[in-house]
Amino acid sequence: TPRPFNQLPGDWRAGWLNLYRFWQEGGLHNLHHIMARKFQQFGPIYREKLGVYESVNIITPRDAAILFQAEGTLPERFSVPPWVAYRNYRNKPYGVLLKTGEAWRSDRLMLNKEALSPQVVEGFVPLLSQVGEDFIRRARAQAGKSGREYWTADFTHELFRFALESICHVLYGERLGLLQDFVDPEAQRFIDAVALMFHTTSPMLYLPPALLRHLNAKTWRDHVWAWDAIFSQADKCIHNVYRDLRLQRKSTTEYMGILCSLILQDKLPLDDIKASITEMMAGGVDTTSMTLQWAMFELARAPAVQEQLRAEVLAAKGMAANTPAPLHPVAVTLQRYITQEVILQDYCIPPKTLVQVGLYAMGRDPEVFPKPEQFIPQRWLGADPKHFKGLGFGFGPRQCLGRRIAELEMQIFLMQILENFKIETMRAVEVGTKFDLILIPDKPIYLTLRPL
Ligand code: HEM
Ligand code: 2DC
């Protein structure tokens, strides 16, 4: 018979003490390292309590498969408390990110049709290619300008702009012009606000929303400022599209973007459309740009892999970037509240427990990925190598809504870069990972783009 829940290894008795210790040992930026260490200490399953939040943590693909079988038809993940607190404080509607139950499902089904379905996704290719071409043009100009015929920089901000330009082209069917020399200060403010929103989330991650609102701490005020800026900028973009549509200023011959399709279908209330479009606009900046930065860094450090991929791209096989990276997931964990009892590692886990898949820890576990620290995209080729391993975008009906947009955006970008430039870096520099709600590089990455 399976072992009882309260025999699970781990520190789950003193939640507030644990939170204090976590904070003291720099856990704010090291959640991923602490988790990896706990799996080493306790084995493939442990129970934990931080503040008022309890969870069971797992690391093996097999256990992940069991978890996702028990997620039910209306899956729920850990809802980030400061995000909930902000919306309640400002009386803003929830989008799919934070909705639950049937309300989540009906919105999500409508949005899936516009953002994930194969028919629609095909239409994103020209939009995303255009943005990628502008990036290439800009990179060539920058290389020319330097007088050295190459472009060396920390590409963080360039990629933020590329990512916002991309997601807005898909959402609104319009270009913002962020890959020109002059950047609209309002768009730049949006980018800065999303980064600040993520950055101020992690210190408040394990405090209950009710407490957060009564806190007048700087972190909370900055967080409110950031979301205010995100919502007001998204509101402007949405309003512009709405107005152009009413005045019939939108060309109906080409694809008009996700927002227009949703408005024209008239199946979702405008407030719900707005809430989810705002989430997609904010969710489309740091995620793809950071992943691309890591991908370029790994390609720069593995010239042989880079050459092989370039050859494939030039041979128009076009599968260059289709390599879910275990090394650099954006999300440190996936989480679900299970709806039925499950057995994990021979322990009984009761319904309603929050179970987390340690995605970062799994990606660096040699049992799951031999030589995990090495960049070997070929590891994804072959017979069913992805079974509950390629989980970077989550799983099931609650998986990432932006998945197809993100995948296409990144694949197209990497193919265009490989066709046009050699990516180089100074080998000596080791770059680690920092938890800033999403996982990002812990120091600036300097890359060189050298025209081929
Ligand atoms: C949810 C990863 C890009 C919008 C998620 C989740 C993950 C994730 C792991 C949770 C899924 C789950 O619980 O199973 C990523 C990665 C990205 C990326 C790795 C890029 C490399 C984007 C983009 C958008 C976006 C471009 C904008 C459209 C969302 C939304 C949700 C979500 C709205 C919540 C969906 C729901 O709760 O129904 N993402 N994401 N993401 N993502 Fe992404
Ligand atoms: C953060 O312990 C660590 O894709 C927590 O595009 C558990 C947790 C819950 C939800 C995760 C979050 C972590 C990381 C960031 C994620 C989020 C769900 C969606 C979000 C993974 C792992 C993200 C970045 C979305 C953000 C959209 C938002 C800006 C509107």
Image (spheres, grey):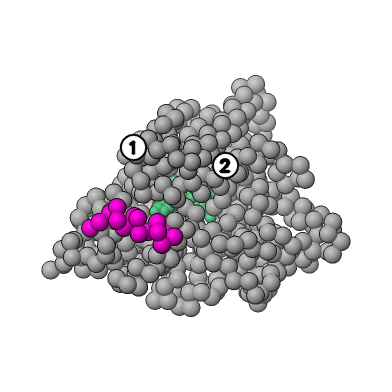
Residue 325: image location, x then y, percent: 52, 65
Q: Which label number is shown at residue 315?
A: none
Q: Residue furthest top?
A: 247
Residue that mark 2 sits on: 193
Residue 220: image location, x then y, percent: 46, 40
- For numbered disc 2, what is the local secondary structure? helix
- For numbered disc 1, what is the local secondary structure? helix
Of the 4 image quadrants, the one containing the N terminus is bottom left
Per the model, the C-alpha gap separating discs 2 and 1 is 23 Å
From the viewer's perspective, is 211 left or right of 349? Answer: right
Res. 110 in view: no
Q: Does residue 379 belong to the magenta stretch?
A: no
At 29% across and 49% down in the image, what residue appears? 52
Q: Is residue 145 above or below residue 365?
A: above
**What's the magenta region?**
13-27
Between 267 and 14, the residue placed more toward the observer is 14
Q: Dot 1: few (<14), some (14–19), or many (≥20) neighbours within 10 Å?
A: some
Residue that mark 1 sits on: 210
